[in-house]
Image (tube, rainbow, N blue to C red):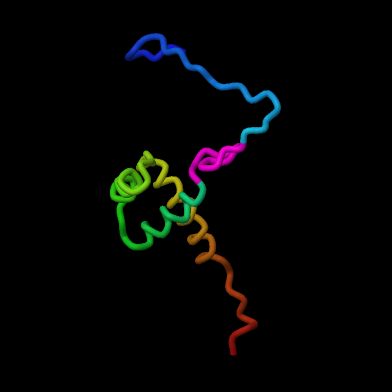
Amino acid sequence: MINPSTGPVTIQVPRDRDGSFTPVIVPKQHRRLTGVDEIVLWLYARGLTTGEISANFNQIYGAQVSKETISRITDEVVEEMQTWQSRPLDCGNFH
């Protein structure tokens, strides 16, 4: 692999031919830590900014979660909320 700022970088990837390794922190086929979405939404609902949430993850978990990732997570929820708020109401249940 070539990194433009440092030049060639050698990466050694351990082999697991029979697929027996099971990661604990970040499960296979996932890109984020388990529970990150829930934590981000919990902090966002309490009024923290994306920068504050990112700083909290770094300080508490030692994990780098970018402001962009946090924005993507909160944007998904905002879209769902807007869809739910704009749904047609069932007037048959009201008297």
Q: Position of residue 73 (x, y in %)?
A: 45, 49
Q: Which residue is drawn at 29% across and 50% down?
A: 52
Where is the C terminus found, in terms of image quarters? bottom right
Q: Where is residue 48 in the image (x, y as percent from the top left)?
A: 31, 56
Q: Where is residue 12 in the image (x, y as percent from the top left)?
A: 51, 17
Q: Is 28 one of the magenta-colored residues?
A: yes
Name the one closer to the observer, 28 or 16. 16
Q: In this view, does 57 lie to the left or right of 32?
A: left
Q: Where is residue 93 in the image (x, y as percent from the top left)?
A: 63, 83
Q: In this view, does 72 lie to the left or right of 24?
A: left
Res 24 → quadrant: top right
Q: Which residue lies furthest to the right in this view?
A: 18
Q: Give the range drawn in magenta.
A: 22-33
State the predominant SS element of the stretch in magenta.
loop
Q: Residue at x 56, y 22 (%)?
A: 14
Res 87 → quadrant: bottom right
Q: Is 58 one of the magenta-colored residues?
A: no
Q: Residue at x 58, y 73 (%)?
A: 89
Q: Is residue 21 above or below residue 70?
A: above
Name the one closer to the observer, 82 or 75. 75
Q: Which residue is drawn at 49% across and 42% down?
A: 32
Q: Which residue lies furthest to the bottom in this view?
A: 95
